[in-house]
Image (cartoon, rainbow, N blue to C red):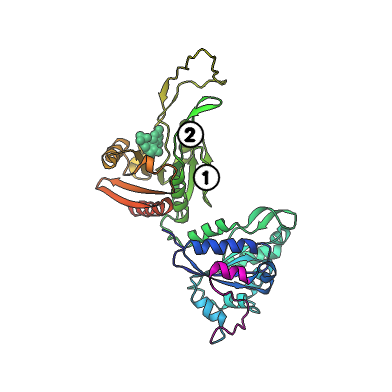
Amino acid sequence: MNTLAGKHLVLGLSGGIACYKAAELCRALVKAGASVQVVMTEAAEHFMTAVTLQALSGRPVYTSQWDAREANNMAHINLSREADAIVIAPASADFLAKLLHGRADDLLSLMCLARPMDAVPLLVAPAMNREMWANPATQRNVAQLKADGVQVLDVGQGDQACGETGDGRMLEAEEILEDLQSFFTPKCLTGKHVLVTAGPTYEAIDPVRGITNLSSGKMGFAIARAAQQAGAQVTLVAGPVSLATPRGVARIDVRSAREMFSAVQAQVAQAQIFIATAAVADWRPDTQADQKIKKDGSGQTPQLSFVENPDILASVAQSAAARTGALFCVGFAAESHDLQAHATAKRLRKQVPLLVGNIGPSTFGQDDNALLLVDANGARELPRASKQALAVELIAEIARRL
Ligand code: C5P
């Protein structure tokens, strides 16, 4: 489920070098299924032409409150009434100050002032030099805008166009997109702490070799993102994967099953929901060589023997919190055949209220998947869709069961 699909957004640009990111944001919003009406201040037009944003949004850009295209000549009323939200990106220090004072001497500020506050939320993505951001005047303005109900997004940190380094960069387009997705997501997990395991584990044989599996972590990361967007505080214990951390999620990187188990044990007391998506290695080599095992030319192969890893899910599911219902545990099963039978048996064996089955070879590494939800009442299929869409459905399903 994509919460931006079908939404109509006014994307406002005030003056700043970050206007180049607004072009990317516009494109990403359209790709996510939103319609975008761009409004630019005169200062913004110094950084980016309206032509670029017209091409990306597929709509003529508005730059003046005297735009004669509107029959009633009231662009500020017409544009703000049809929007699901107004997003100002970049929001310059000057524009934030104008918003704060309710000034209305250009189309964008006039439209923000004229918007129906209950129906049309206003989100701003600040963008400025670090000294401008840190200035007490800006910080006062930001605090007051928040108190006035404006959603002020975070700023990024790093190298700035002026050559300085610090806080105040505008977030990247992808980050703003995630924040907007999140803003429109129903908050069914507010106040809950969710612990998720994701990805494979890596069991070392020697310092340069090990045993792992093809899990990409995409399903678990999608679940962590969906839970965070649903209002939960999320901790993600991730095996070795190369995926970006979902915004607002606390991530703990681990390598082996035993490291994953320790991280889960340290975090689980705070959680009300535990979702084990990780493809934890069932076995590990019983010894790990300190030095690389060398091929000696004799043709002889090393003799490996294995010991079983701790079953993280089964252990958590037997804790007092899980048995009394204070912790809701969800397991996953990656099978190659007879999904319902295996998932049903695994649910009973792991003693979890909900077990999610999927076919391993057709999910590992993919961006989409199909899930089979198995509980005490039977099974229900979530047909093939993107992992993010399935994650949103699964989170809603878990919230209903709490
Ligand atoms: O037994 P199997 O590995 O098929 O069980 C899969 C489920 O159990 C998944 O939820 C997985 O994350 C979890 N699991 C675990 N620790 C293990 C093995 C599996 O938490 N050692």
x and y percent of residue 39 in the render? 59, 73
Q: Residue at x 57, y 79 (%)?
A: 76
Q: Residue at x 27, y 42 (%)?
A: 340
Pick whichever, 45 or 247, lies toward us: 45
Residue 54 sits above or below residue 247 on the image: below
Instruction: Name the side, left or right, on which 3 lies relative to 107.
Output: left
x and y percent of residue 259 in the render? 49, 33
Q: Residue at x 56, y 21 (%)?
A: 292
Residue 56 on the magenta segment: yes
**Quadrant of the snapshot with the N terminus:** bottom left
Predominant SS along the magenta part: loop
Identify the residue position indicated by label 2 in the image. 262
Identify the residue position indicated by label 1 in the image. 243
Can you see residue 393? yes
Instruction: Name the side, left or right, on which 398 lies relative to 149.
Output: left
Asked whether the residues under the numbered discs 2 and 1 touch, taking CB atoms below 8 Å apart as contact, a structural biologist would say no
Q: Secondary structure at mark 2?
A: helix
Q: What amino acid is found at the position of numbered circle 1 in the picture?
A: Leu
Pick whichever, 40 or 316, lies toward us: 40
Q: Nearer the viewer, mark 2 or mark 1?
A: 1
Q: Which mark is residue 212?
A: none
CA distance separating discs 2 and 1: 22 Å
x and y percent of residue 8 in the render? 48, 70
Q: What amino acid is found at the position of numbered circle 2 in the picture?
A: Ser
- Residue extent of the magenta highlight: 50-71
